């Protein structure tokens, strides 16, 4: 009798441990989490003369930015507050004023289901291959397609996972880069993205402007990746279009060599060109040690006319060397 009772108690103890212990573990996984992450970057640039692209265009020993990302993830909802300081950060949020001039992203989200998420606030653009964070780009300098924008949007978007390999994003957005509020009444913009097996077709339209963009890439082997970006923009005042290839070869666990080969055309007066073509060739090395990444980079820009300035005046070509250090945490 005593042995039977002991056996029953022992069995009950094991069952209780498996059931309640398992529940405790599952519940712990559902606990909300708060995290702090970001980057700090700085660089040296060999020339004071730079092409008409964003970031990495200051002379000598220069500052990039300090980027601090605060995020909170609950079971169904959360937020992201992405703050930037320094020249790169100031360029990234040029459409903001006052205290908002340090806000790169600021949004809340709600997971309606495992496959449907609503996001409200200010978030970086869904168009293009490159982003604002230097840690998320392979090349340290940026392309013309990225520099001509958009950088960010404020609005409401819905992200829908249609299957494991197909996704859809739909959004109603303020005027491009108007991060704090809508400056032109009720004339909003519309954004859409269709994701197919890691390739993305993007659309931004409204207020007389339309941009169509493709972003994708293929892993040809464990060591070789080829990224692709193509874009076309048109409004009443300007047109621009471009295409870029991003080959990257991992030569070791710590060192990768990559390039960006971009052809870009503008008709109008938005940025670097009035009416003209540009070819940009960038070769970047990426050496990683722990949280630190060192990027030496050579870049040559060639235009169809003398659109640049150097020490001798107008010129149709520029070349430079950049050495960047990026720390991620």
Image (cartoon, grey):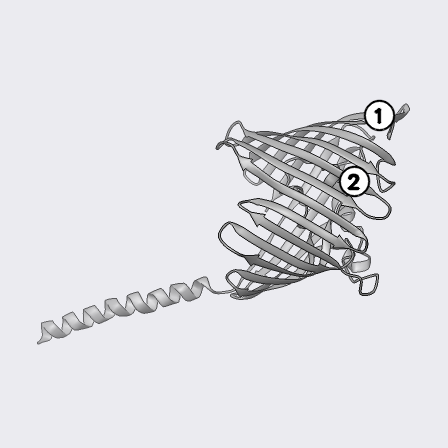
Residue 221 position within the rendered picture, expressed as x and y whole percent measured from the top left: 49, 31
Q: Quadrant of residue 185?
A: bottom right
Q: Which residue is mark 1?
A: 316
Residue 209 position within the rendered picture, expressed as x and y whole percent measured from the top left: 79, 51
Query: From where the camera sits, is residue 141 visible?
Result: no
Between 51 and 272, the residue placed more toward the observer is 272
Between 291 and 159, the residue placed more toward the observer is 159
Classify 10 Å Cα crowding around label 1: few (below 14), some (14-19), many (20 and above). some
- Disc 1 secondary structure class: loop
Name the image quarter holding the N terminus: bottom left
Between 180 and 237, the residue placed more toward the observer is 237
- Disc 2 secondary structure class: strand
Please give the label number shown on residue 240.
Answer: 2
When the figure is inspected, residue 81 is found, relative to residue 263, above or below; the finding is below
Specify the farthest residue to the top: 312
* Mark pair 1, 2: CA separation: 19 Å
Specify the farthest residue to the right: 313
The residue that appears at 79% across and 35% down in the rendered structure is: 265
In terms of sequence position, does the residue under pointer 1 or pointer 2 come before the other? 2
Query: From where the camera sits, is residue 227 visible?
Result: yes
């Amino acid at each position: 009798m005593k042995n039977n009772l002991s056996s029953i108690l022992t069995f009950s103890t094991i069952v209780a441990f498996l059931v309640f212990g398992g529940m405790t573990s599952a519940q712990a996984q559902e606990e909300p989490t708060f995290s702090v992450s970001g980057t700090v970057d700085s660089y040296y640039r060999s020339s004071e003369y730079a092409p008409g692209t964003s970031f990495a265009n200051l002379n000598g020993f220069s500052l990039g930015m300090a980027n601090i990302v605060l995020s909170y993830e609950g079971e169904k909802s959360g937020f992201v507050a992405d703050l930037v300081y320094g020249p790169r950060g100031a360029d990234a949020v040029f459409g903001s004023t006052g205290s908002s001039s340090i806000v790169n992203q600021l949004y809340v989200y709600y997971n309606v289901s495992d496959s449907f998420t609503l996001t409200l606030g200010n978030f970086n653009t869904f168009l293009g291959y490159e982003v604002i964070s230097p840690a998320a780009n392979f090349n340290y300098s940026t392309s013309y397609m990225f520099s001509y924008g958009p950088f960010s949007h404020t609005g409401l978007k819905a992200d829908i996972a249609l299957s494991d390999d197909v996704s859809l994003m739909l959004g109603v957005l303020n005027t491009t880069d108007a991060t704090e509020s809508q400056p032109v009444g009720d004339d909003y913009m519309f954004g859409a993205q269709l994701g197919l097996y890691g390739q993305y077709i993007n659309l931004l339209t409204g207020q007389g402007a339309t941009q169509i963009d493709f972003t994708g890439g293929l892993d040809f082997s464990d060591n070789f990746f080829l990224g692709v970006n193509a874009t076309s923009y048109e409004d009443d005042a300007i047109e621009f279009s471009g295409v870029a290839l991003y080959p990257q070869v991992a030569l070791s666990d710590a060192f990768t060599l990559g390039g960006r080969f971009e052809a870009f055309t503008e008709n109008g007066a938005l940025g670097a060109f009035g009416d003209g073509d540009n070819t940009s060739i960038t070769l970047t090395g990426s050496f990683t040690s722990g949280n630190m990444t060192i990027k030496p980079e050579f870049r040559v820009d060639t235009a169809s006319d003398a659109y640049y300035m150097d020490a001798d005046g107008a010129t149709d070509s520029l070349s430079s060397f950049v050495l960047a250090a990026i720390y991620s945490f």
